């Protein structure tokens, strides 16, 4: 029998969260701008660990899919996705351009090297591209100074039949925690790119879900937002839960107790004995460890649900196991169900907070050895 751990993905939660994002955007639309922007569902990193196949099903109502990996993009086409597919980092070498051409992939253009590769390419049909402006993240994109010239080169590629059109894109660095910086970064976009022809794309989850933010984005033609993390039921904001945003967890990491024991006052638990029993108590051992992708930095006090009851981790997470306090769960025994995060358990964001990281990292890090199940929807479970 395999270990009792599993990661279950509910396709209807993905659809629900996409619909939630669409509704939020519609609510910030006005009579001045009646149509909501198009939505790229961001599915990079194997759809934040949820699976490309599941994402293509769950996000069937999205206007497009955005990712980085060429193989994932090709997989979407093979699954029958006919709407746009966007490569957020574009292409990496000249040979990639044949794949973009064959599978009709939209690309970011963020560097002079990419413009040069495109200028030298032979294509069967013109590509679609967004020229990326660096508004202060300082990762990818042309600077404010070099953008007009880069954009003009892209226009030239349009005239040469290499591009069907050239759009504009940028990415905010602090949409989750600093409205003033985001406004300033939007200002760079407005000064530099708004008004140039072609569609444009801004807004990750945090900007997309910030009330009223959309109405401050210039109404500048065909518009695309790029939410990612919120579509998986994790909050982009440190101070607002996914639940309060109307989002549903799309992945549940669950396992079972494989051992239960009584320990005495001052007994240590796990490597390094970082936890010592404050009194006689019962603990349970869960079949889940850092080799499953559970964060090793989640220490004593990290929330977990055992047999429907909220309790906490005790001691260090080992490679294949972790220990929990069974004081509030006297009925627990080997085989009792455990939810590490997701439906019927703590949110992935609560676990991430306890481990000093973010939900994104935990969702992406679930290890290949964890068996995956795909279901339509979770049955809601109350937690005691
Ligand atoms: C990952 C990514 C997004 C989505 O970000 P979330 O915070 O997950 O919503 C949007 N745009 C780009 C360029 C990205 O790399």
Image: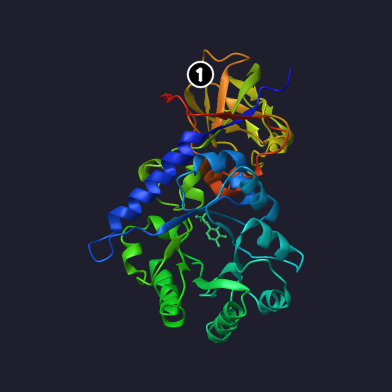
Q: Residue at x 39, y 66 (%)?
A: 179
Front in this rendered view, residue 159 or 205 = 159
Image quadrant containing the C terminus? top left
Residue in front for this viewpoint, 103 or 72: 103
Residue 86 at what x, y percent from top left?
A: 57, 59
Asked whether residue 224 appears in the rendered view, the answer is yes
Which residue has dot 1 on it?
Answer: 329
Residue 178 vs 383, above or below: the answer is below
Does the rendering let one see residue 241?
no
Residue 325 higher or lower than 251, as above or below? above
Residue placed most toward the observer, 74 or 82: 82
Total marks in image? 1
Q: Is residue 98 above or below residue 277?
A: below
Mark 1 Cα shell of 10 Å, populated few (<14), some (14-19), many (≥20): some
The quarter of the picture where residue 55 lies is top right
In which quadrant will I find the N terminus? top right
On screen, 361 above or below 324? below
Residue 248 rendering spot, x and y as whole percentages: 44, 38
Residue 381 or residue 336, whichever sits in front = 381
Secondary element type, mark 1? loop
The residue at the point 63 percent across, 28 percent down is 6
Q: Position of residue 369 (x, y in %)?
A: 73, 33
Residue at the extreme left of the image, as rendered: 31
Q: Respond yes or no on whether mark 1 lies under 8 Å from ligand 1.
A: no
Q: How is the image coloured?
A: rainbow
- Residue at 57% x, 28% y is 278
């Amino acid at each position: 029998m395999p270990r009792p751990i599993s990661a279950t993905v509910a396709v209807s939660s993905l659809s629900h969260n996409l619909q939630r994002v669409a509704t939020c955007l519609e609510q910030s639309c006005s009579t001045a701008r009646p149509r909501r922007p198009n939505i790229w569902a961001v599915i990079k990193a194997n759809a934040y660990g949820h699976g490309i196949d599941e994402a293509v099903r769950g996000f069937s109502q999205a206007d497009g899919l955005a990712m980085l990996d060429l193989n994932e993009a090709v997989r979407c086409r093979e699954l029958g996705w006919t709407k746009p597919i966007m490569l957020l980092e574009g292409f990496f070498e000249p040979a990639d351009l044949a794949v973009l051409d064959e599978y009709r992939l939209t690309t970011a253009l963020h560097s002079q090297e990419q413009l040069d590769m495109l200028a030298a390419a032979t294509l069967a049909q013109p590509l679609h591209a967004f020229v990326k402006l660096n508004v202060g993240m300082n990762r990818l994109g042309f600077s404010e100074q070099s953008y007009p010239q880069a954009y003009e080169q892209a226009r030239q590629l349009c005239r040469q039949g290499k591009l069907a059109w050239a759009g504009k894109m940028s990415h905010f660095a602090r949409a989750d925690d600093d409205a003033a910086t985001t406004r300033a970064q939007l200002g760079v976009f407005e000064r530099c790119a708004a008004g140039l022809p072609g569609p444009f794309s801004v807004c990750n989850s945090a900007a997309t879900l910030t009330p009223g933010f959309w109405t401050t984005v210039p109404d500048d033609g065909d518009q695309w937002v790029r939410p990612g993390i919120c579509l998986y039921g994790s909050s982009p904001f440190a101070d607002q839960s996914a639940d309060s945003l109307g989002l549903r967890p799309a992945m549940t990491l669950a396992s079972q107790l494989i051992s239960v024991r009584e320990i005495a006052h001052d007994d240590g638990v796990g490597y390094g004995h970082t936890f010592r029993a404050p009194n006689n108590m019962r603990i349970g051992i869960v079949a889940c460890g850092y080799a499953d992708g559970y964060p090793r930095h989640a220490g004593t006090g990290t929330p977990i649900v055992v047999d429907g009851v909220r309790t906490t981790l005790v001691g260090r997470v080992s490679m294949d196991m972790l220990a929990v306090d069974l004081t509030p769960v006297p009925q627990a025994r080997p085989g009792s169900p455990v939810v590490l995060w997701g439906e019927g358990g703590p949110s992935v964001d609560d676990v991430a907070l306890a481990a000093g990281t973010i939900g994104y990292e935990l969702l992406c890090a679930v290890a290949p050895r964890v068996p995956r199940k795909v279901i339509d929807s979770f049955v809601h479970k109350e937690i005691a």
